[in-house]
Amino acid sequence: MKKGVSPLIAWILIIGLTVSLALIVGNFLKESAETTKESLIEYVEGGSTCDKIIINAEPLECNKASRNIKLKINNRGFLAINKIQVRIFYSDNTLGNEIVSFNNNLLPDNSIEAVVPIENKAIIKLQAVPIREETGCADKKAELSQEETQWFVGGC
């Protein structure tokens, strides 16, 4: 009877040790995956996308009759841009805010002419903020002001 008990105890110990080891390794891998996921989300949302975006905005035309301005937006970065947010600072200390979506993404090394509606007021400054996949990159904005040598044809 003693000969049959030893192998049974050995198998129980082996199975218990295997299950315990599997739980320990499984918990370690789960925690490691969560940490990696959090750091990846932080990397993507925390500015790595914006680091690869560079735009220029050139004033082309100001049409007070149709209440539109035309900008040439150049994408000099490494990623496509979906749209731009145009902030318009008026002389009476009001702010206009327009989102201009592109029919197709603005690919790197390409440019597009964007038409932005304006109010019938004098413009002091204009900022174009690039947006990629609903993430705005305010630190990568292109800024135009009347103090610069090139301004809109027609004055605005």
Image (cartoon, rainbow, N blue to C red):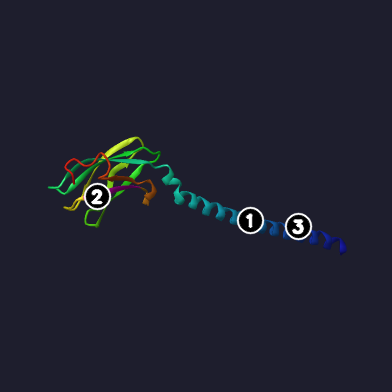
Q: Quadrant of residue 14?
A: bottom right
In the image, is 75 to the left or to the right of 94? right
Q: Position of residue 42 (x, y in %)?
A: 49, 52
Q: Tell me the residue that label 3 is attached to.
A: 14
* Magenta stretch encompasses residue 31: no
Question: Could you tell me the amino acid type at mark 3?
Answer: Ile
Work out how far the residue at label 2 is from the one at label 1, CA to CA, in angstroms. Answer: 58 Å
In the image, is 124 to the left or to the right of 77? left
Q: Tell me the residue that label 2 is attached to.
A: 124
Q: Position of residue 18 (x, y in %)?
A: 71, 56
Magenta region, mostly helix, strand or loop?
A: strand
Q: Position of residue 155 (x, y in %)?
A: 18, 44
**What residue do we see at 27% from left, 48% from top?**
126
**What residue do we see at 43% from left, 46% from top?**
49
Q: Secondary structure at mark 1?
A: helix
Earlier-in-chain disc, 2 versus 1 = 1
Magenta stretch bounds? 123-130
Earlier-in-chain disc, 3 versus 2 = 3
Q: Tell me the residue that label 1 is attached to.
A: 28
Considering depth in this image, is 4 or 55 the residue closer to the camera? 55
Question: Could you tell me the amino acid type at mark 1?
Answer: Phe
**What residue do we see at 55% from left, 51% from top?**
36
**What residue do we see at 18% from left, 53% from top?**
119
Rendered position, 99 above or below 148: below
Pointer 3 with pointer 2, Cβ within 8 A? no
Total numbered circles: 3
